[in-house]
Image: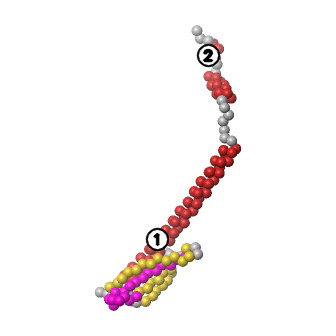
Amino acid sequence: MNNPKLETRNPKLLLLSVVSVSSVAGEKRGFTLLEVMIALAILALVGVAFLRAQAGSIRLVDESNQVSLATLLAREKMAELEGMGFPEVGKNSGTGGEAYPALRWEQVVTTTELPAIRKALVRILWKDGTRERTLELVAYFAQK
């Protein structure tokens, strides 16, 4: 025996009416204004800390890049001295040129206590904001 009233009912309407009855009968849900304000304050603090960390990271990457370029130029200038065999005593300086526009270099070759050995110093200089930065590379050459 089928009940004709139950079969003609729309099941979607029945589900909607049950949902609406349960939400009305349940307790109030949601956040108070105070809870939202505290959550936003915590989120703002975390955001500021994250931005500071990012700024520090970018600064370190820039410094690392400058030191890498200075090291490449120093090795290039030291290789020039090595190509001379036994370099002459004296001082030479210049700029980094197109490849290293922000860098300056100095080559200083001096005698040592042993006349058959010379000390070569390659110094790279660059400005980092308001301070002057340097990188030095030292090698000793023996007369053959």
Magenta stretch secondary structure, dominant: strand
Which residue in the structure is indicated by mark 2? 7
Q: Residue furthest right?
A: 33
Query: How far across and how far down the image is residue 94, in percent?
Result: 49, 83
Q: Residues within 10 Å of mark 1 (few under 14, many from 20)?
A: few
Tell me which amino acid carries mark 1.
Answer: Ser
Res 9 quadrant in image: top right
Which residue in the structure is indicated by mark 1? 68
Which segment did they paint magenta? 110-127
Q: Residue at x 58, y 73 (%)?
A: 129
Q: How many numbered tags mark residues here?
A: 2
Query: How far across and how far down the image is residue 54, in percent?
Result: 56, 60
Q: Residue at x 41, y 76 (%)?
A: 75
Q: Residue furthest top?
A: 1
Res 50 quadrant in image: bottom right
| Mark found first going from the N terminus, 2 or 1 | 2
Q: CA distance from mark 2 to mark 1?
A: 80 Å
Q: Residue at x 55, y 63 (%)?
A: 56
- Any magenta on residue 11? no
- Any magenta on residue 125? yes
